[in-house]
Amino acid sequence: MSPRKRTVLTITLVCVMTAVLVFGGRFVGRVSAVAKETYENIEVFTNVLALVQKNYVDPVSTKQLIDGAITGMLAALDPHSAYLPPDVYKELQVDTRGSFGGLGIEITTKNSVVTVVSPIEDTPAYRAGIKPADQIIKIDDEFTKDMPLVEAVKKMRGPKGTKIHLTLRREGLPKLIELTLTREVIKIQSVKSHMLEKGYAYIRVTQFQERTDDDLERALSNLERENGGPIGGLVLDLRNNPGGLLTQAVKVSNEFVDSGLVVYTDGRLESQKQKYFAHKAGSASASEIVAGCLQDHKRALVLGTQTFGKGSVQTILPLDESAAIRLTTARYYTPNGRSIQATGITPDVIVDNAPIQQAKAEGESGFPAIREENLPRHLEQKGKGAPDNGTRSIEEEPEEAAAVHEGELGKDPQLDRALELLKSWNVFKTVVAQNAP
C-alpha cells in the first residue's frame, strides 16, 4: 500500500455532469426470435417507407430514410442514446484519445435547442467568451431547433483552420450573439496540478482519457518532489470535467482507495451487471463515480454544489466496421448502493462559488443551469440494494460536464474553503496526537 493512500486527506471539489459509455467489442448479432407484434410494426414501417419514397416532393434514398428512422428511434428512448454514423463514431473514438479538431465546447439539448454545458479551457469557444447555458440558435446558416445532438457535434467539428459561425442566445441579453470562430486541434490536458502552499497540493482532472491515470501518478510524484516530502492535504478538483473513460475513473479512484468496491452497474442483461474494485497494487470513472467512491469509502470530504446527476451507462454497440449506436444499457451505483440518476451526489460541505452567484444576480444564467433531471425523457432513479459478491471486467466509456473555475486561491471561494478545511483537520489531528495517553 502506498504512503499516499494512507496519509493524504483529500477534499474533492464537485459541480459536474457525468456520462458513462462502454465500448462494446463485437458487432450486434442477429436476433434469433422476434415477437409477432414486432413483425407487424415492421410492416407498418416498410409501408411508410414505400409511401414516402413514392409520394415525397423530391426523390429520397432508402439509406437516408433508414438513417433518419434509426436516429429518431434512439432519440425517443432517452437523452443519451443515439445513432453514430461513421464520421461521428470515428470522432467519438478520437475524443477518448484527447485530440480532435473543433471548437472545444461541450453541448446538450434542452427544449429541443442545442445548449452549452461548458466551454473547455484554452480553446476557441472559451476564448470567445461562450458561457454555460448559452443556446446555440444557428450553426453557420442552419437552425439547431430539433437538430440531433450528434449532428450538431458533427457540424462544429472540422479541420484545423476552418471557420464556423455561431448564433447564440444568452439569458438576460436583448440581442443575439454572433461569433465567427476558427477551429483548432483541441488537445485536452487531462491533469493539471500545482502546490497551493507548503504541504497542500491541488490537482484538477479535466477529462478522463486513456492516459489520465499515468498523468495523475506523474502529477502526484512531481508535487511530492516539489513539496520535499509527502503531501499532507490534497484538493482534487473534478469541476468542469467534460468526460472520459470509465476504466480511467476506476483507476483514478484506485489511487486513493486501497481496496473494496469502486462502482457497479446494473442492467437487464447479466453482461451489464459489472463491478469494479480497487486494488492495493494498482495505479490509481467519471467525476461523479470518483466523488461517490471517495465519499462512500470516507477517503475524501466532498465540497461544492450538487452534481449533474447522470447515473446511466451508455454502451457503444458497433453495427459494422464504421457505424455504431450509443445505447443506455444500465444504471450505475456507488459502493454503498446509491443511484445518483437525476439526483446527483450531495456534497458533505455545500459551498457555492461567489462569482457564479454574482453572475446570477447580474442576469446571466450561472452554472448549473442544466442538470440531468431537466433533460426530456431522462431515466427515473431506480432503487438498488448493495451488490452481490463477484468480480467482472469491462471496457471503456466517455462522459460530459460543467463550470469554469481557475483553481487559484483568492479567486475561487470553493478552493479557499477546501484549503481551510484541510488545515483545520491537520491541526485537529496534531492536537489529538499530542493529548493521546
Image: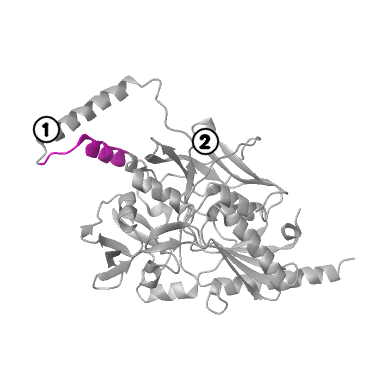
For image coordinates 56% across by 45% down, the residue present is 333
Q: Please state the horizontal and vertical placement of residue 324, each as a whole percent of the image.
A: 39, 40
- Image x and y of residue 247, in percent: 57, 47
Mark 2 neighbour class, 10 Å CA radius: few under 14, some 14 to 19, many 20 or more: many
Image: 34 above or below 147: above
The image's colouring method is one colour
The answer to which of marks 2 and 1 sits earlier in the sequence is 1
Residue 18 x, y percent position in the rendering: 48, 53
Query: Residue 270: image x %, image y %?
Result: 54, 31
- Compared across the picture, whether 311 is left or right of 391 comes to left
Query: Which quadrant holds residue 193?
Result: bottom right
Residue at the bottom extreme of this rendering: 410
Per the rendering, the mark at residue 272 is 2
Judging depth in this view, the residue of 426 and 225 nearest the camera is 225
Q: Residue at x 40, y 50 (%)?
A: 91
Q: Magenta stretch?
A: 58-73
Q: Is residue 411 above or below residue 50?
A: below
Please indicate, yes or no, whether residue 252 appears anywhere in the rendered image.
yes
Indicate whether 425 appears above or below 400: below
Of all residues, the one furthest to the right in this rendering is: 437
Disc 1 residue type (three-letter): Lys
Mark 1 packing: few (<14 Cα in 10 Å), some, or many (20+)? few
Residue ID for mark 1: 54
Secondary element type, mark 1: helix
* Side of 218 where 112 appears, left or right: left
Q: Does residue 55 appear to the left or right of 406 in the view shown? A: left
Question: What residue do we see at 71% from left, 69% from top?
Answer: 225
Q: Is residue 63 magenta?
A: yes
Give the CA distance from mark 2 to mark 1. Answer: 43 Å
